[in-house]
Image (spheres, rainbow, N blue to C red):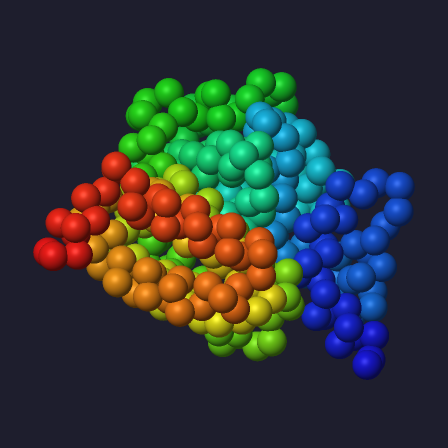
Amino acid sequence: MEPVTFFTRIQKYVVPRFIHSYKDDYIGFIAKHSNKSRLELIEKNLIGILSVLLTSEEEIKESKIMKIINNATPKYKNYKLSRVVASVSPLLLIWEILCLYNSDESKKRIENALIYIARAREGNNSSGSISTTSITSDSNTSATEHLLKSKDDSNCLETLFEMNILGLAQSFAAAIYGSKGTQPFIARVQSIRGIMCLAELANSFESCLPQFMTSLQVALESPELQLEALRCLHTVIQKLRASSLCIIIDLVISYLVQKYELFSKDCREVAKLILDTIFSDRFDVEKIING
């Protein structure tokens, strides 16, 4: 494989992780061997870079993040972080951030990052440019703290999800089906975890439940993805209302019964948890099944 081809393929996954590197110029090295300028490489991977930086700490410190970006390229020297965030596709940025989910700690950071995105875009849409009430680039206080005063966080976040939920369902399908080309295994795993996180955070998740379930069924049929897909299914069911559970209950129960003997030990444990949740006091299963 030619070096240009190799570095072009891996840049999406490694450039955001190397943005913190000061001692070694990995980004310059990748740019050189990809036949791109440093600026071209940064701009091409800006969404991935922002997703990593916005979730790297418990608090979003705008000045610190902008210093890291400016260390890689001087183009954004006079920019506020909110302006940079508002300049990229919200759907792609939300999806990249959701796919970083791997623990309760990361979920809180993801939630903070998504609220920040909503606020940044809210300021941009209301005035044509980012609101001057956004914190300045030399402030050391939390960006989230300054941006989240005018509107309830949960409402702000839910509005963001409602505007992008269909696109997120399509992004999940693209990752699972590989419609954008061959998806690395870890990217497919991360996409499933992203949907787990989405189910945890978004009430509007249920509006696209059939689309999410179609992609999740495909993942369940893949042995290497089965455990992650079952965990995701469990999270989804835990968050559903009874009126939404009725849409998928027959499919879920029949699938688990038919496949149970073929499951690994870990998959069987998760399958039991799913059935326990369905038949818990929270849901009146008889009423749901009988309509």
Foreground residue among 18 and 185: 185
**Quarter placement of the N terminus:** bottom right
Q: Where is residue 190 in the image (x, y as percent from the top left)?
A: 57, 55
Q: Residue at the spot x=22%, y=59% of the render?
A: 247
Instruction: Examine the rendering and report whether any part of residue 215 can be seen.
Output: no
Q: In this view, does 177 lie above or below 269?
A: below
Looking at the rendered structure, the number of numbered marks drawn on it comes to: 0
Left or right of residue 89: residue 213: left
Left or right of residue 249: residue 17: right
Q: Position of residue 235 (x, y in %)?
A: 42, 46
Q: Position of residue 86 (x, y in %)?
A: 46, 44
Q: Position of residue 148 (x, y in %)?
A: 40, 24
The extreme bottom residue here reads 1
Foreground residue among 144 and 28: 144
Q: In this view, does 22 lie above or below 112?
A: below
The extreme front residue here reads 261
Foreground residue among 271 and 207: 271
